[in-house]
Image (cartoon, rainbow, N blue to C red):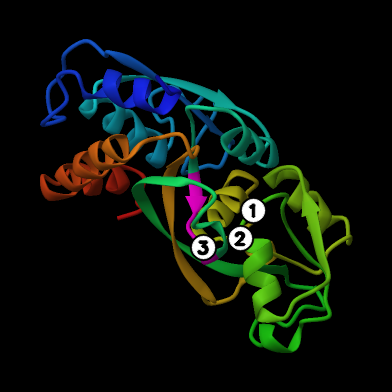
């Protein structure tokens, strides 16, 4: 029997409604990265809004969550090369459509530019700044968005901390990223007054996605569970806890 069939069969046991709290019957391997306030490594009772959403999804489909924090580019590699591996938060773009099985939508993302007050990047006219150096996370979907918008001078960093160092060290003129991740990064450094933000230039949806061996039954289970979470207010309550709703 193929692995995907075994996975679907294991998850189907006792999961028709996906709303009970019986002992998990399977384990879900998930890879992610430290992306406050969405996912927080060693966050204790505040592990991040999307981490809490994924925790609740796993409860409702009766799976035990096995979470691994790795650099984002490695997370993407693992989710596209290892069997039965999920990843979040993944931006759903047309060029990624056939790369993953899309398990559940988690969060509406808003991408914008960040620049220091003394930067050569004109935050009010980003369309005129396409020759400037833009820093972002390595492997992130922002690169494809920037290229689509006509930006070519892209500098990739391994972490949010490295993006910040590129900005303060003069190695980049601006950064491009998700609004709430940027705001959290600035707040953690008490640097809000040192930088300016552009209005959002692109909005997308971040998903929990799986490797291609997740079968249709598994996908439907996760999507039904997420729809139930939205309907009963659980999703909104979790996001509101982090001031994201």
Determine the residue positioned at 68% across, 87% down.
Answer: 127
Q: Residue furthest top?
A: 23
Image point 33% across, 15% down: which residue? 26
> Closer to the camera: disc 3 or disc 1?
3
Read off the residue under disc 1. 140
The answer to whether marks 1 and 2 mark residues whose Cβ atoms lie closer than 8 Å is: yes
First in residue order: circle 2 vs circle 3: 3
Q: Residues within 10 Å of mark 1 (few under 14, many from 20)?
A: some
The N terminus lies in which quarter of the figure? top left
Task: Measure the alpha-carbon separation of dots 1 and 2.
Answer: 9 Å
The percent coordinates of residue 221 (x first, y second) are 24, 36
Which tag, 1 or 2, sits closer to the chain's start? 1
User: Is residue 198 something one can see in this rendering?
Assistant: yes
Q: Is 91 covered by the magenta stretch?
A: yes
Regarding mark 3 in the picture, which secondary structure is present there?
A: loop
When asked about the image quadrant of residue 209, the answer is top left
Q: Which residues are magenta?
A: 89-94
* Element type at mark 2: strand
Q: Is residue 152 above or below residue 238?
A: below
Q: Which quadrant of the rendered structure holds the C terminus?
A: bottom left
- Residue 191, position as x, y percentages in the image: 66, 55
- In the image: residue 108, left or right of residue 139: left
- Residue with the mark numbered 3: 93
Is 26 colored magenta in this rendering?
no
Which residue does the image show at 54% across and 52% down from the upper left? 181
Crowdedness near tag 2: few (<14), some (14–19) or many (≥20) residues, C-alpha within 10 Å: many
Q: Position of residue 14 (x, y in %)?
A: 14, 19
Q: Nearer the viewer, mark 2 or mark 3?
A: 3
Disc 2: which residue: 177
Q: Toward the viewer: 100 or 49?
A: 100
């Amino acid at each position: 029997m193929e692995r995907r069939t075994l996975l679907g069969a294991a998850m189907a046991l006792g999961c028709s409604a996906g709303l009970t709290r019986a002992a998990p019957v399977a384990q879900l391997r998930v890879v992610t990265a430290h992306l406050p306030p969405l996912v927080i490594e060693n966050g204790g009772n505040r592990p991040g809004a999307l981490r809490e959403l994924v925790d609740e999804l796993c409860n409702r489909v009766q799976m035990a969550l096995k979470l691994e924090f790795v650099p984002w580019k490695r997370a993407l590699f693992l989710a596209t090369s290892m069997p039965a591996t999920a990843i979040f938060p993944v931006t759903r773009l047309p060029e990624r459509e056939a790369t993953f099985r899309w398990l559940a939508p988690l969060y509406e993302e808003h991408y914008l530019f960040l620049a220091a007050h003394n930067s050569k990047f004109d935050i009010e006219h980003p369309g005129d700044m396409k020759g400037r150096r833009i820093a972002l996370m390595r492997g992130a979907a922002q690169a494809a968005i920037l290229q689509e918008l006509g930006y070519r001078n892209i500098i990739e960093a391994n972490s949010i901390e490295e993006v910040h160092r590129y900005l303060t060290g003069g190695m980049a003129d601006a950064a491009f990223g998700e609004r709430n991740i940027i705001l959290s990064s600035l707040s953690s450094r008490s640097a809000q007054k040192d930088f300016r933000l552009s209005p959002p230039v692109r909005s997308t949806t971040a998903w929990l996605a799986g490797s291609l061996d997740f079968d249709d039954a598994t996908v439907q289970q996760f999507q039904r569970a997420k729809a139930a979470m939205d309907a009963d207010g659980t999703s909104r309550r979790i996001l509101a806890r982090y001031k994201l709703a």
